[in-house]
Amino acid sequence: MALTYSIYEAKARFSEVIRQVREGRTVTVSYRGEPVAEIRSIGRRQTPTLEERLDDLERSGALVRPTQPRQTFRPTGHRPGGLTRFLAERGE
């Protein structure tokens, strides 16, 4: 069931318009008798998993997945006692 409001009416009765949309109705907003917008429920969407979201991004071209497995990083050099030297320089 579609309802139609002028822009003025939709602004004045915004809470009522939203209530009707939440109840499943579609509301059309018109300007000088011509429909210009439609307000409808977006429904209850289930939050996608990370894997589903990554798949969507890959399909849209916004993401390119790596072809090789990720490597672990290891430090290039190790100097023990870094915190001790840092605190000594600060005088603590």
Image (tube, rainbow, N blue to C red):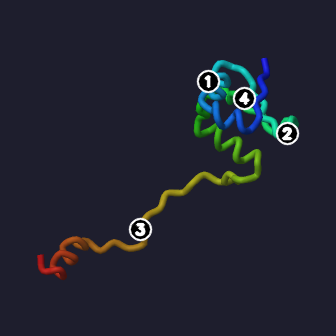
| Residue furthest to the left | 92
Q: Where is the N terminus found, in terms of image quarters?
A: top right
- In the picture, measured across the screen, residue 31 lies left or right of residue 43, that is right
What residue is rendered at 44% in x and 64% in y? 74
Looking at marks 2 and 3 on the same chain, the residue that comes earlier in the sequence is marked by 2
* Residue identified by numbered label 1: 19
Disc 2 residue type? Arg
What residue is rendered at 71% in x and 38% in y? 8
* Residue identified by numbered label 4: 40
Disc 3 residue type? Pro
* Residue identified by numbered label 2: 32
For the residues marked 4 and 2, what is the alpha-carbon distance in whole angstroms? 21 Å
The image shows residue 23 at horizontal and vertical percentages of: 65, 18
- Between 65 and 80, the residue placed more toward the observer is 65
* Residue identified by numbered label 3: 75
Looking at marks 1 and 2 on the same chain, the residue that comes earlier in the sequence is marked by 1
For the residues marked 2 and 3, what is the alpha-carbon distance in whole angstroms? 69 Å
Q: How many marks?
A: 4
The image shows residue 35 at horizontal and vertical percentages of: 85, 35
Q: Is residue 67 above or below residue 25?
A: below
Looking at marks 4 and 2 on the same chain, the residue that comes earlier in the sequence is marked by 2
Disc 4 or disc 1, which is closer to the eye? 1
